[in-house]
Image (cartoon, rainbow, N blue to C red):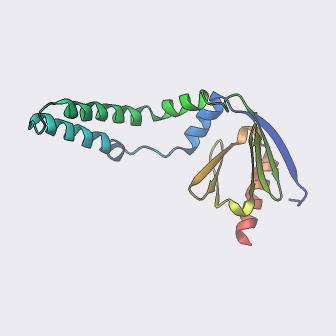
């Protein structure tokens, strides 16, 4: 690919995009570990109530209710995340996405972020897009707004930046 390669596209931050973003980047929930905190709250609350360790049962009931809320937060994690994104101020904004030999750039409203290829620790390809790993942070790019030439260019540029 040539060093003067330039690609610009635009996409909208809407519910289908947010759903794709969550589905492609979320870590799968492991059953016992995900609900461990809720189970501990439940056991603690039941112990407080059963053994009457406190003069009134309010604290025990508090922990039991807290365990139910914790279980719901794990179970409805995707729904909750999507709802927060769809009511955010960025919903409906257009994002201008640029790819060139220097790196990638996002521009939307007040946000203007450029990432050099060397800053991207890992370029993970999924079925529907790319996940850019930047330390512990991850950015998602949907392939729906990219063509094959850009996809190939991004993979080659990232590989080239890691080789040097």
| 146 displayed left or right of 75 | right
Tag count in the figure? 0
Residue depicted at x 73% and y 57%: 155
Q: Nearer the viewer, residue 148 or 53?
A: 53
For residue 131, side relative to residue 80 (left or right): right
Q: Could you tell me residue 29's position as x and y percent? A: 42, 43
Q: Which residue does the image show at 31% across and 44% down from the upper left? A: 37
Which image quarter: residue 12?
top right
Name the outermost residue toward the left.
Answer: 51
Q: Please name the residue shown 57% across and 45% down the image.
A: 25
In depth, the one of 133 and 64 nearer the eye is 64
Front position in the image: 54 or 66? 54
77 horizontally vs 16: left or right: left
Residue 112 on image: x %, y %: 76, 46
Which quadrant would residue 134 be assigned to in this image? bottom right
Q: Which percent across, then down, holds residue 15? A: 63, 28
């Amino acid at each position: 690919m040539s060093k003067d390669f330039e690609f610009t596209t635009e996409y909208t931050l809407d519910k289908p995009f947010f759903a794709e973003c969550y589905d492609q980047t979320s870590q799968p929930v492991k059953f016992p570990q995900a609900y461990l905190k809720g189970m501990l709250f439940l056991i603690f609350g039941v112990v407080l109530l059963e053994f009457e360790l406190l003069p009134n049962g309010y604290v025990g009931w508090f922990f039991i209710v807290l365990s139910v809320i914790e279980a719901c937060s794990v179970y409805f994690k995707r729904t909750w995340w999507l709802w927060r994104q769809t009511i955010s101020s960025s919903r409906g904004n257009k994002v201008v996405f640029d790819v060139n030999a220097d790196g990638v750039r996002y521009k939307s409203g007040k946000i203007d972020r450029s990432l050099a290829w060397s800053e991207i620790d890992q370029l993970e390809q999924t079925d529907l897009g790319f996940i850019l790993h930047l330390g512990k942070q991850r950015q998602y790019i949907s392939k729906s707004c990219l063509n094959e030439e850009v996809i190939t260019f991004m993979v080659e540029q990232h590989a080239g930046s890691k080789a040097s």
